[in-house]
């Protein structure tokens, strides 16, 4: 079963700056505590990450997964999907950036299907931690 969630934050920074922070995946371990390592395996012609291998903490264990990024709607939106992973069947996500004066409305959406079903209370706890990533992005963009 696919579980989906989304959240929106208003960030006191330009959309371009938010976009730049969001695609600087190799620095995620500096500000996203659950991301332990991010290694870019492939880049596009503009040097943006296309294929990224992650090691993260999830549900009390370490997980490995590789995401494929899509910049077709950049810089307004970045999307990604699972290329391969050890505990998930699918991951589809996006950041959408909407400039409004000196601030940017950023919407983070994520859908995940795990290989092993989890009880509801564990799913809700994991969802809260995942969506907290947007708050961490906000802090990073505003610092």
Image (tube, rainbow, N blue to C red):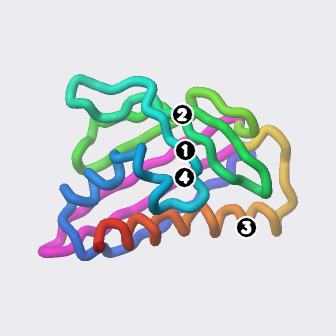
Q: Are marks 4 and 2 in contact (CB under 8 Å)?
A: no
Q: Are marks 2 and 1 in contact (CB under 8 Å)?
A: yes
Looking at marks 4 and 2 on the same chain, the residue that comes earlier in the sequence is marked by 2
Give how far across and how far down residue 112 sits, in percent. 64, 47
Q: CA distance from mark 1 to mark 4?
A: 20 Å
Foreground pick, 56 / 125: 56
Callout 4: SS: strand
**Span colored in magenta:** 89-113
* In this rendering, the label closer to the viewer, 1 or 4: 1
Give how far across and how far down residue 25 sits, in percent. 41, 45
Numbered-mark total: 4
Looking at marks 3 and 1 on the same chain, the residue that comes earlier in the sequence is marked by 1
* In this rendering, the label closer to the viewer, 2 or 1: 1
Q: Is residue 86 highlighted in magenta?
A: no
Foreground pick, 132 / 116: 132
Name the residue that disc number 1 marks: 37
Residue situated furthest left in the rendering: 101
Structural crowding at the residue carrying mark 1, measured as other residues with C-alpha within 10 Å and reported as few (<14), some (14–19) or many (≥20): some
Callout 3: SS: helix
| Drawn side of residue 137 relative to residue 34, left or right | left
- Residue plotted at (70% across, 42% down): 63
Residue 124's disc is 3
Name the residue that disc number 2 marks: 53
Q: CA distance from mark 2 to mark 1?
A: 8 Å
Q: Quadrant of residue 37?
A: top right
Callout 1: SS: strand
Give how far across and how far down residue 75 sits, in percent. 22, 47
Name the residue that disc number 4 marks: 110
Q: CA distance from mark 4 to mark 2?
A: 17 Å
């Amino acid at each position: 079963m696919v579980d989906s969630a989304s959240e929106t934050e208003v960030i006191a920074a330009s959309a371009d700056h938010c976009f730049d922070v969001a695609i600087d995946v190799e620095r995620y371990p500096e500000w996203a505590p659950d991301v332990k390592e991010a290694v870019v395996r492939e880049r596009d012609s503009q040097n943006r990450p296309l294929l990224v291998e992650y090691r993260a903490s999830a549900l009390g264990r370490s997980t490995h997964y590789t995401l494929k990024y899509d910049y077709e709607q950049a810089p307004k939106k970045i999307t990604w999907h699972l290329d391969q992973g050890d505990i998930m069947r699918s991951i589809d996500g996006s950041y959408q950036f909407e400039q409004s004066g000196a601030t940017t409305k950023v919407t983070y959406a994520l859908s995940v299907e795990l290989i092993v079903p989890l009880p509801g209370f564990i799913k809700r706890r994991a969802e809260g931690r995942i969506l907290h990533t947007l708050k961490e992005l906000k802090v990073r963009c505003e610092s």
